[in-house]
Image (cartoon, rainbow, N blue to C red):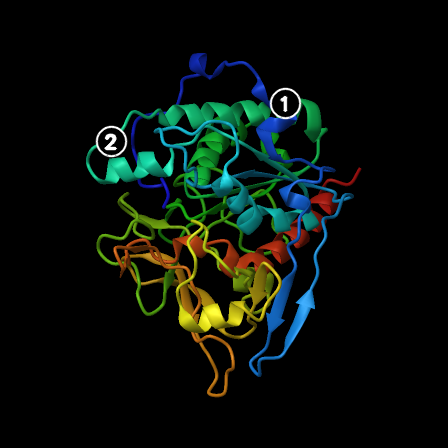
Amino acid sequence: MYLAILTLGGFASAAEETQENIYRSPDAWLCRPGRQDICAGDLSSTIITRDGSMTRENWKPDPAAPIDCFYVYPTISDDPGGNSGLVPGAGEKRAVEHQFARFASVCRPYAPMYRQITLAGLRSYMAGNPIPMDPALGYRDVLAAWKDYLQFDNQGRGVVLIGHSQGSRVLVELMRREIEGSPLQSRLVSALILGFNLDVPKGGDAGGTFKQIPLCRSANQTGCVIAHVSYRASSPPPSNALYGRSKTPNMDVACTDPVALSGTELRSYIPVRSNLLGQSVSQEAWTKMATQVDTPFVQLPGLVGAKCVNDGQASYLAVSLQPGPQDARPADIPGDIVSGGKILDNWGFHLNDLNLAMGNLLDIVRAQSVAYLSKNAK
């Protein structure tokens, strides 16, 4: 579960942002270019077609990628306090593997640790008995990591910002305070702000959460934002939805259609053996398929579709399952948040916001990289 709904207080003032720069230590980063870390691990996938035939797609990072990516992970820490420490646990590593590492094929990867609000902190808040936590601490850490990256690594390169849920919330603050309206805005290739209620005026692309930075409307557009929250088409955002329904008058939650932007069908990379929270998949057909696969991800072309929907009350990426009559694959994919054996439909398909469209997002970032470099060629 994640933090985009929490409003536990403001972020740090400028005076409070000063802190010792811990990001000179390589241990403060989950991914950096040129290392044998999570972003250089095994991300191979098995492509399973409707007749059940399987082919393997191998993967490798591109050490010569011409742009950078800077990632802030969602609420995932299993540390017991309200804020996490800076020692990576299984959750942080899993989030990077599921959501970010594959981007190392199109950009140099940077993923700092930060002292986020933990799963324990989120659960205590939602239960009405919050434990002590500091929501500003994580932002100060990410700000310090960003400044360290700019000073020692960026060298004027274009950068893609990638976040999910709490990570998106922190990146939004960073963009509003440090990037929008500043010279750094010219280095923004794009920002993937996923699993977060990003406001835009009804019928508009800017003037909500961001005053100047618009939504992306083509894969060749740069300096823009890609955003969506996902729900099953068969279970759209209910009245108590955590995502997809703006609380600001005359605003919609942004949805940039990854299928339309990339110009290809939905290309999902679904983790095989556990969801983002590390929970084993209990669906019988999926478990049976997993025993036949030796890669950490599967692709199921044609099984899943997605498109942006705005029904006047909510704006979201509607995810549909479309198995064929003789389809040998599971008829459903994991991704719901379950508590006490019950699906929490107000969370939607939050766990899969990135993986559902991972292939499309990679294609878009690749095209944006080409457009950015062409525009900024000297």
State left or right for residue 354 relative to residue 47: left
- Residue in front for this viewpoint, 280 or 133: 280
Q: Secondary structure at mark 1?
A: loop
- Residue in front for this viewpoint, 298 or 20: 298
State left or right for residue 125 relative to residue 194: left
State left or right for residue 304 relative to residue 233: right
The image shows residue 49, relative to residue 203, as above or below, that is below
* Residue 334 placement (x, y as % from top left): 42, 63
User: Which residue is rendered at x = 58% and y = 80% of the image?
Assistant: 52
* Residue 262 placement (x, y as % from top left): 59, 61
Residues at marks 2 and 1, CA–CA distance in whole angstroms: 32 Å
- Location of mark 1 (residue): 25
The image shows residue 230, relative to residue 23, as above or below, that is below
Residue located farthest toward the bottom when viewing the structure as drawn: 326
User: Which residue is rendered at x = 72% and y = 49% of the image?
Assistant: 61
Q: Which quadrant holds residue 170? A: top left
> Is disc 2 surrounded by few (<14), some (14 to 19) or many (20+) residues within 10 Å?
some
Task: Give the amino acid at mark 1.
Answer: Ser
Q: Determine whether label 2 and label 1 are within 8 Å by CB.
A: no
The image shows residue 378, relative to residue 278, as above or below, that is above
Q: Secondary structure at mark 2?
A: loop
Task: Give the amino acid at mark 2.
Answer: Pro
Q: Which quadrant holds residue 119? A: top left
- Location of mark 2 (residue): 130
* Any part of residue 232 in sight: yes
Residue located farthest toward the left when viewing the structure as drawn: 128
| Quadrant of image for the C terminus | top right
